[in-house]
Amino acid sequence: MISAPNHLQRLNGNKIAWVLWLFLLPAFYSCEALKPIQGSPGTTKTDPKKDEKTDVKKDPALEEIQGRKRYDPETKRWVYVEYAPTEKMDTIIWKDIPAGSVNVITGEDSGENTDIFDPGEPKEEGQFGTQFFASYNVAVALPFLTDKFDARTGAIHDHSYWAIQFYSGLKMAIDDLTSENIQLNISVIDTKESNETAVQSLVRINPDLKKAHLIIGPYRRDNVKIMADFAKTSDITLVSPASAASGLTSSNPNYIQANPTLESHCASIAQHALKHYSPNKIVLVSRDEPAEASRLQYFQAEYASLQNRRDTARLRELIISDKSADLARVNMLSYVRQDDTTVFIVPSWSDETFIYSLLRKIDLVRNPYNHVVVYGMPQWMQYERVDYEYYEKLNVHVSSSSYINTLEPQTQLFRQRYYDRYGTVPTEDAFIGYDLMLYFGRMLHKHGTKFQYFIDSEASNALHTRFQFLPIEGTTMQRSRVPVIDRFENRYVNILEFRDYQFQLSE
């Protein structure tokens, strides 16, 4: 654990320090540790105009809605990023370092530094029991994997990079918040993405978690659930930066989900399609599997909601067996509108071969007099075998929780600031860390410890997306018939269009 205030006051060096950056800093500030994304080890590159594709190992532990494909505008190539903590991690092992060591940010476990880590009594209280302090305690729980750092070679474990990039962006946001006179006491905790027992031990004994006003993290779904339960019982607000899973907690207004769920992705796709095309032009397509076919209900429900009636006609559906012979027998021509536009929405991603075969079959029945649009999922941006010509010819659109426009002045400024500070270019994770810390730091300052109850009126554009948080109501009702809040979720989803051999923000 590292405990450090955002204003980096000098701390007493006579106590034992919990260490993270002693291991990471020497390599972290070198170009070798955080290389530009196109040259990073553990990645493969794909040129959309050339068939130069290599295998990338897939991990079933990845979240359902999560993209690992990055577009590098300098090389004009898509890059597959493998830096993410997806493997089973070891049990936490803390390491003690002499207080006089260099590059160590130390913190007190004795509670003597009350001027730094104890914000004192609240200055005032407000609606929903929110409290305002002169400074706020923020615990950042990320999988830095310091136990996997190789001190002999200075090599950082591949799965540490997500946390390093995220935290690097977060630190830049802290500097900006300090310039706005927003004081935060930052406590950094290495979760090491360990097993559930170790994370349960963390929430039971870690003092910085218990005294936090806000917790950001962790990464893995199981650990998020443990931390969400802790936030609920301890009445501490938790922001989950990565997990897109739903159902991790219930009746928990202290849980904020920054990554939209599958339902939000489907609803956003439906909204975008129905905004641009009439319902009779839309066809929902799914494999004949219960998990996939059930997703079509998200689109039907959104369509009914937009029509403001429950007895409206349903969108057309096409259920296909994933067997090659069955797909070949499908009369796709009967679904394509001649001399008009046809929109296929395909909420499927687990079988790349199926998607490739489907796109190829749709393309075969096209003619110069009709127009085809295909909506897919964010995982499509990771595919390696699908010919990008199909993406271009079929006007493929996908949903995405993130989109970084490299031509925006604010994006270019951040990239320059990041490079000046760390000597390398930021990945998407650095943008996310910066955006989340900046947004929630301002929310704490403006609305106090229960800022989530005001969050639906605080929509904000960020560098990587737009924050549009809404309370998600549960299925149970209180005696007063007031809906129970299960969580707060960012419901904004970017819709990207494949145009000029790259995914761009669609209108």
Image: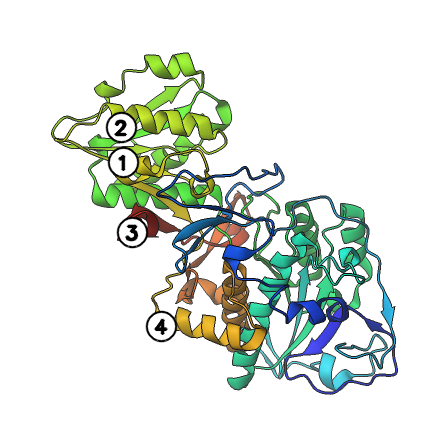
User: Which is more foreground, mark 3 or mark 1?
Assistant: 1
Q: Is residue 366 above or below residue 439?
A: above
Q: Position of residue 334 (x, y in %)?
A: 22, 19
- In screen coordinates, is 436 left or right of 211? left
Q: Position of residue 14 (x, y in %)?
A: 88, 83
| Residue designated by label 3 | 506
User: Which residue type does callout 3 highlight?
Assistant: Ser
Between discs 2 and 4, the one toward the N terminus: 2
Cα distance between the residues tagged 1 and 2: 7 Å
Cα distance between the residues tagged 2 and 3: 22 Å
| Residue designated by label 2 | 363
Disc 2 element = helix
Mark linked to residue 346: none
Cα distance between the residues tagged 3 and 1: 15 Å
Q: Is residue 390 above or below residue 332?
A: below
| Residue designated by label 1 | 394
**What residue sits 42% from the left and 40% below the top?**
377
User: Which residue type does callout 2 highlight?
Assistant: Asp
State how many labels appear.
4
Between discs 3 and 4, the one toward the N terminus: 4
Q: Are marks 1 and 2 in contact (CB under 8 Å)?
A: yes
Between discs 3 and 1, the one toward the N terminus: 1
Disc 1 element = loop
User: Which residue type does callout 1 highlight?
Assistant: Leu
Disc 3 element = loop
User: Which is more foreground, mark 2 or mark 3?
Assistant: 2
User: Which residue type does callout 4 highlight?
Assistant: Pro
Residue 323 can be seen in this image:
yes
Residue 447 can be seen in this image:
no
| Residue designated by label 4 | 409
